[in-house]
Image (cartoon, helix red, strand yellow):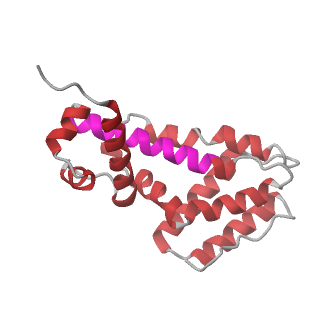
Amino acid sequence: MGRQKQPAIAEDLLDQCAEHALTHGLPDGLGPFAQATGTSARMLLYHFGTRDELFRAVLRRAREMHLASYGELLRVVPGESYTRTLATAWVGMTEPEGQSFLRMFTHLPEQRENSLWPGFHARATTDWLPLLAQGLSTIDPPPSATLVLAVIRGLIMDLDATADFRRVDQAFTMFLRSIDPGAPEVSRPHDP
């Protein structure tokens, strides 16, 4: 008779694997996860079944963390203009902690995405629209959530390619001021 699986251990391993993936990206094999968790590939398979099942679980957990983190940044703050919220969210998304989500999900190869989480890229785009639409409804007239999301995604790609925070932050400030002339300037507590 074999040992009974312990869900608490599996959850802890999953959290550690997700943190590792957010820092280093999704690995090709189990070795990096085994090393990061201090266990063996065999134990990971014992808890998760197959490599792909573990990878899917890691992607789901990292996505839960991503939604919670960015969702908090994008939520409406009573008494604060939503363009100020967006300016603050932009900094949070593009600081090192926020970039870990972007690196992992932006660089998830299309081929791997299709096998591990079919439709992920489409869902990862559209699931932000209701949250943005809610916040943007406080601006008169409300801009399109799709347009705002497209600008954010495009500037994130620019930042990823160039690391030119000053120029990209200025562009985001200009965009915010195009939807609300009273929008604040994007400011960072330190130069990245």
What residue do we see at 22% from left, 31% from top? Answer: 49
| Residue in the foreground of this view, choosing between 92 and 175 | 92
| Residue in the foreground of this view, choosing between 148 and 99 | 99
What residue do we see at 65% from left, 41% from top? Answer: 129
Segment colored magenta: 50-71
Q: In the image, is residue 42 above or below residue 159?
A: above
Q: Quadrant of the C terminus?
A: bottom right
| Residue in the foreground of this view, choosing between 6 and 71 | 6
Horizontal arrangement in the rendering, residue 162 relative to residue 2 (left or right): right
Horizontal arrangement in the rendering, residue 157 relative to residue 152 (left or right): left
Give the number of marks: 0
Horizontal arrangement in the rendering, residue 62 relative to residue 192 (left or right): left
Q: Which residue is most to the bottom?
A: 191
Decide whether the magenta segment is chiefly helix, strand or loop: helix
Q: In the image, is residue 128 above or below residue 35?
A: above
Report x, y in % for residue 7. 33, 31
Q: Which residue is most to the top?
A: 1
Q: Quadrant of the N terminus?
A: top left
Q: Is residue 141 visible?
A: yes
Q: Is residue 109 visible?
A: no
Report x, y in % for residue 172. 68, 66
Q: Which residue is most to the left?
A: 1
Residue 10: say if magenta. Answer: no
User: Which quadrant of the figure has residue 137?
Assistant: top right
What residue do we see at 68% from left, 41% from top? Answer: 131
Report x, y in % for residue 185. 76, 71
What residue do we see at 38% from left, 60% from top? Answer: 23
Horizontal arrangement in the rendering, residue 99 relative to residue 191 (left or right): left
Q: In the image, is residue 76 above or below residue 152?
A: above
Report x, y in % for residue 76. 76, 47
